[in-house]
Image (tube, rainbow, N blue to C red):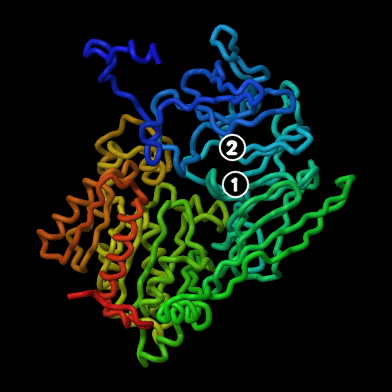
Amino acid sequence: KSKDKDKQPPHWADEKFVYREDFGETLEGKVAPAIFVFNLETNKIFKVQGVPEHLYPQRPMFDADGGVVFQAVHLPLKKLGLNFCLNKSIGLYHFEKLAEEESDASEPRRLTPDNFYLAFNACFDRARTKLVFFGREDQFVSHSTNYAVYGLPWPVPDGTAPECVVEPVRDLPSDGDDFAGFYGYHVTFCPAGFIGDSSRYFLAQSQCMARNRIYLVDVVEHKVEWLNFLDKADGEYEMLGCEGTSLVFRYWSFNRLASAHLVRISTAASDDSAPTFSVVSLIDDKVPRGLAPAAEELFTALTTTVKQHTVRLDNGAEAYLQYDQAVLSGQGKPLPCLVVIHGGPFGASPRDAFLFQRNMFVGMGLAVLTVNYRGSTGFGEDFLNALLGKIGEVDVDDCGNLVRAALSEHSSIIDKDRVGVYGGSHGGYLTGWLIGHPEYRSLFSCSALWNPVLCLPYNMQATDIPDWVTACGKDEPLQYAYTAEDNALFWDKSPFSVVKNVTCPALLLVGTKDLRVPPHQSVHYYYTLRSQGVDARLHTYPESGHSIANMEHNIDAQLNLALWFADKLDAPMPYGLAPIAE
């Protein structure tokens, strides 16, 4: 305390106003990650010394002898946004001994080769004889990709290269396929790990054609098996936690509430045979008791009368049309439709998940068309990579053509004169493109854009991930110096390039502290629309970032989305839900 009391504030001639970088969206102000160890015997905490400059550690874990294995991001020039961004040079490192003082420190040993681009979410088997991790040996520019699974013996002998246990899947899967590779981000693979005392069998989850599934990986035979615990081909399986020989997962589908299940896993002592699984239900999928009558009626409808159809293009892009058959029958005419486009762009809209927002729109009496365009994950690596360098082209065409196909195939369900479009981030980018595109803008009667990317030249200079612009715009790694030709290319790929064509109403929802897609472009877009006589409305949420996660702000945004589309699409609003108040 006395030392803190004697400290003087930084002087103007010192480093008070020196620029300090951080790691961008959701990590604002985080500038120097470090490894700390809490000694339970001495009740002391110390910082591990010896991590080199420009090497930023993540996910440390102990080895069997008190050393630490960790992954670390190498960013020698600039700290870039890390949240939902795995296209960074990330290696595995090991401190054999932990130094509390700088004078005792030595640099960690790198476990993956210098030219091995990405290694993350490593885990030991219980005996600490094997290390398994996700990654890619080759460099890639998309913020997520199709990851391989690698293994290393422990301890790692000098010069040992990681063994590839599961190869990436390049081809578009067919309807009968149950594995399309491993996709996701850090959080996707956090529950992954070895089963009990096994050093052979490993659990992980990933998407396959817009359905999340849990897989058993045999690291000896290099095999992957889908664990269809409930013997249901549809629906979503999500790992909630795995410890030892117990696994808890959630299952749900587009018309089924979430249920939770415990899996007890039995393994052979020799590790020669595959484990067996027994499932115990923890929480059923029944409609909760004690709801208000209108809410109970709505939940009952969402789990009994909601239907789904799949619309698919020859290139593999697909969309899922969900609607309430009872509302359609009661109306006696086609329903207004809302097209929902996911962000990322390297993510995917779940086909089967019982999602709040999608069900909110269905509960309003809308047909909802959820789109997965080229670039979406879970459809093979070639499908994902088809977007690189071609944003504003293949993704726009996929969305426009899927809407046209849905209107043609399901004209008895969708009212072609009442079609809205909505998306956030890259989904907002595509919404801006679709409502201004010469070929597709006539399809839509209204729109909403949540923190949308609208101007790529601006984003190149303002976002926490400028590498996104060069990856998606040029299929190239980040280069800070760019040309007038690059600038023109980025402009041509921006929704602002077609804003003059926009005539349909547009709602913009913007977080003023968004570091991923900074807000000024949305404000200018709003005034541009107003200057053209377009019905436009702008909501700004102070101190909120890209996801507008603040509870008050998020509720406001969700409700205003609902009210906007209820009004502009003349939604039926069944089940006692009120329309816009005058």
Identify the disc placed on residue 120: 2
**Distance from Cα at disc 2 to Cα at disc 1:** 9 Å
Q: Along the line of sight, which residue is nearer the eye, 560 or 217?
A: 560
Callout 2, which amino acid?
Answer: Phe
Look at the image and tell me whether residue 366 can be seen.
yes
Mark 2 and mark 1 residues within 8 Å of each other at the beta carbon: yes
Q: Residue at x 66, y 23 (%)?
A: 41
Measuring from the top left, give residue 373's x and y in whole percent.
45, 61
Q: Is residue 439 above or below residue 108?
A: below
Q: Secondary structure at mark 1?
A: helix
Measuring from the top left, give residue 489's x and y in whole percent.
29, 45
Q: Residue at x 57, y 55 (%)?
A: 380
Callout 1, which amino acid?
Answer: Phe
Measuring from the top left, give residue 80's x and y in whole percent.
40, 33
Identify the disc placed on residue 189: 1
Of the 4 image quadrants, the one containing the C terminus is bottom left
Q: Is residue 320 left or right of residue 448?
A: right
Q: Is residue 196 left or right of residue 234?
A: right
Q: Along the line of sight, which residue is nearer the eye, 449 or 375?
A: 449
Q: Residue at x 53, y 36 (%)?
A: 139
Answer few, some or many: residues within 10 Å of disc 2's Cα (few below 14, many 20 plus, some between 14 and 19). Answer: many
